[in-house]
Image: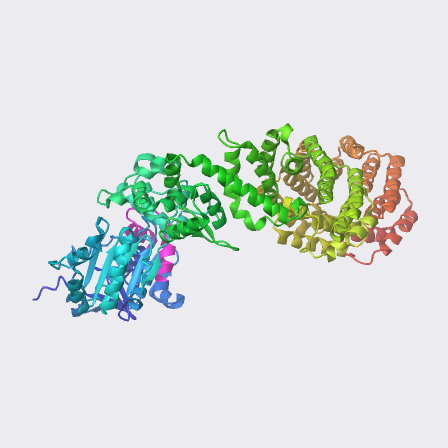
Amino acid sequence: MPDTNDQESAIAFGPFRLFAKTRLLEKDGAPVHLGGRALDILVFLAERAGEVVDKRELIRRVWADVNVDEGSLRFHITTLRKALGDPGEGSRYVVNVPGRGYCFTAALLRAAPSENRTSLPVAAPRSLPSPLAKMIGRDDAVARISAELALHRFVTIVGPGGIGKTSVALAVAHGELQAFDGQVCFVDFGALRETRLVAGTIAAALGLTVNSDDPMPGLLTFLRSRRMLLVFDSCEHILDDLAPLAERIVREAGGLHILATSRESFRADGERVHRLFPLDCPPQRDGLGIADILAYPATQLFVERIAESLSEFELSEEDAPLVAEICRRLDGIALAIELAAGRVNAYGIAGTASLLDSRFSLLWRGRRTAVPRHHTLSAALAWSYDLLPANESATLRGLSTFVGPFTLEAALAVASCQGIGEAEAAEAISNLLSKSLIATSPAERRLRYRLLDTTRAFVADKLVENGEADRVARAHAEYFRDFLRDIALKSTGMQSAGGFLPYADHLPNVRAALTWSFSDGGDRTIGVDLAASAAQFFLELTLLTECYRWTQQALASLDASAVDGRNEMILHAALGVSAMFTQGNTEAVRSAFTRSLQLARELQDLHWQLWLLRGLHIYLTRVGDFHGALGTGEQGESVARKLNDPASTLNVEWMLGVAHHLIGNQDKAVQLCESAMLHNPGSQRLNIGHLGYDDRIVALVALARGLWLTGRPDRAIEASRYTIREAELLEQPLTLGISLIWTIYVFLWVGDLANAEILIERLIDHSARHFLGPYHAVGIGQKGELLLRRGDVTASIEHLRRSQATLYATRHRIMTTVFATALAEGLVAQNQADEALQTINDAIAEIPDHGESFDMPEMLRVKGDILARSGNAAEAESCFRDSLDLSRRQCALGWELRGAISLGRFWRQAGKAGDARALIAPLVARYQEGFQTRDLVAARELLAALN
């Protein structure tokens, strides 16, 4: 009986053949590229065809060395099904049995051993090293390179050191053995130092005897008659000599193909470059579980390498995010990930993550069998760095000062301080990019560059060793000072918004420049100028805490003898805004705005004056000084007249409209704010929008509320919904918060409690995510009002008191009387009439000397209800009448109807039904819309009862 142990039989199903021993899957005779885990699953299920294999048994078989959950299994089953055909066809072979496991249901045939397969010549071990037992995350790259190699005879795999170029090349080469009848030869140039020996090294790898000083003629004679694949590995240091030789070989030997690996391309005729990118890493996003994290090749590699040295290793929920962070920090570089995984045995995952910032991480050692340049990250990077000419190494050292992405202009500015001309620096950057020492970073407007973190750490040490760190840091800070100042000038200063938003990716570099400027070794003069230039940048990105920190530090560093008035004006303005939204409505905010406004007047800068009046207007409304806000708007009118600018005039109208609404002049408020519904939000206007506080949205909320108050409920709801939609488009956290806070009341007023609840929960979540403390407190208070309307009085009171405590602490007075009114209603509902009366009296007393406020009629009505419940009939009726009188003066039909309903009920109990009908019926008749809203329904029910 013949010995057939070396001949492998295939398992056939449909158009597929599976060779389990050689781990090969074919479809119609062509290889199907399938990941290692998915192939393991297929082999195991095929061995147990027709049986239902328990999920846990399948996981134990496929992940014998790692503990994972069912999410990873589902991921690889999905991958397997895709490889077996479209979703319907793939599902036909691998069936999920709910609650039990998976079953391979295809009819199987055992194919006879393939003669062609056994007769293939096998490359000698010296010619082609063994591939990795398991390569992670590179199946697609191997498939694409194999396809490119079939179409183009010269393919170079290009990428930075340690990314896995050699491993991928070997996988491709082994996959091409059949196509080249075993004629595949591996040539390792890594150890070659004498470039004159390049041709001889190729000849020696081919087993040729060299008897001449010039081996090329004999080499070409040998290669011309053969179909062969040459694999050239680690070519970057000999490209000048190897490139013309490779080009000649490809041109003269028609059956020869070359697959090369290099940190830069050959730039040869006929060359096809395949750039190998880092392994995909999990995104920086909350909520990723173990299965999500292990779905990415970088983390799979990390865990696989740990399991090789720690057989009992089990990835925990707590450690999984750290593994994702490590892989991201290492930029998905395979060598770096393997080296870091090798440290877990000594330091643990958390300890390894904490050491990534240490320069010692560059010295972590890898496998003893690795080539010397891959023993450590430092060695891998030194191999590339030491090959650089002086201009390129100096340019690269300078680039280490950048944090994150940078532009070509920024790079050239820093290179100039190294004594490198612009043309030379541009050429150096181009060369560094081609040598994989600089990476490109995606950007919408223009190309951005970046250094991988490992490269940056290595060359930053070189920068210090060369004594260049301070000079480069100064040039970096000066560049970003000038860059931000130019944008501010182009956008005419803080009175317009949006100019900085396209440059948000410069944020890490701006932070780094400020940190250096205010450090002990920095330059505070640059720091002050930079902080002033960066103020609007931080505000437009709604980075209020950072804006507060740097402007405060800059103001503390101002030299009184050499102070620049404009810089001081900008810094005080930004300090006032950022402090208002982060520290609360303190007197320091008023002082900052006042000082900045004084400087703007001294500089006779009308645009700045108007902008600062707008900021002061916001502050005064927040502290409840509505008449002060109106006075500020009137000052703005004077400035707008001098500017003779329609946009400024429009914005001043909105300032006045908002102030009139808060004071209680609702007809004027609606008249002044109606233009906000028609105004094109893209047009130029005075804008506090880069604070995340858009003028038009503030006018719209005043309009929506004014419409309800003046007796147009349906239009009020329509305007509220429109306002929220417009605020969402702006993507400004503060503006969206404002739109929610004020329009929620329209929904509460009309009695649409379901939509009010949705918006309240959204406000609470939104303010928590963006650290908007006072807004969060308002949301809690509004939830208290909602609970009160639904009859849960105890919970309502608890929410309202929590809210009030925060709002008083931050001097956010604009809402305190509103919540005090609701609290008083809750207290009287619990028969705590004395405390309720004290609460409403305290709220009324908060209104300044003018005694005018948008909510005063409602406060008087609620006080009347409390007095009536307490048996103080005369005082109660007086309060109701005062509420009605003030409602009429304010043109607030909404409050007037509410007051009339309360007084009507009071009169009904006193036997004055006719007076009650005469009071309520005309008010109901004035409404042309909103007949199903809460108060109109209540009024009609009361009229029916009175009849």
Who is closer to the viewer here, 619 or 940?
Answer: 619
Q: Is residue 287 left or right of residue 383?
A: right
Who is closer to the viewer here, 351 or 915?
Answer: 351
Quarter holding the N terminus is bottom left
In the image, what residue occupies the spot 62% across and 46% down?
Answer: 488
Who is closer to the viewer here, 687 or 760?
Answer: 687
Residue 857 lies in the magenta-colored region: no
Q: Is residue 163 left or right of residue 737?
A: left
In this picture the colour scheme is rainbow
Please indicate, yes or no, whether residue 168 appears anywhere in the rendered image: no
Q: Is residue 252 above or below residue 446?
A: below
Who is closer to the viewer here, 883 or 350?
Answer: 350
Q: Is residue 28 above or below residue 294?
A: below
Residue 79 lies in the magenta-colored region: yes
In the image, residue 171 lies at what x, y percent? 26, 57
In the image, residue 655 lies at what x, y percent? 76, 46
Give the number of callouts. Answer: 0
- The range drawn in magenta is 54-81
Q: Main secondary structure of the magenta part?
A: helix
In the image, residue 771 lies at what x, y percent? 59, 40
Q: Is residue 888 above or below residue 345?
A: below
In the image, what residue occupies the spot 89% across and 49% down?
Answer: 919
In the image, residue 23 lies at what x, y percent? 24, 59
Q: Is residue 591 above or below residue 542?
A: above
Please indicate, yes or no, whether residue 668 appears anywhere in the rendered image: yes
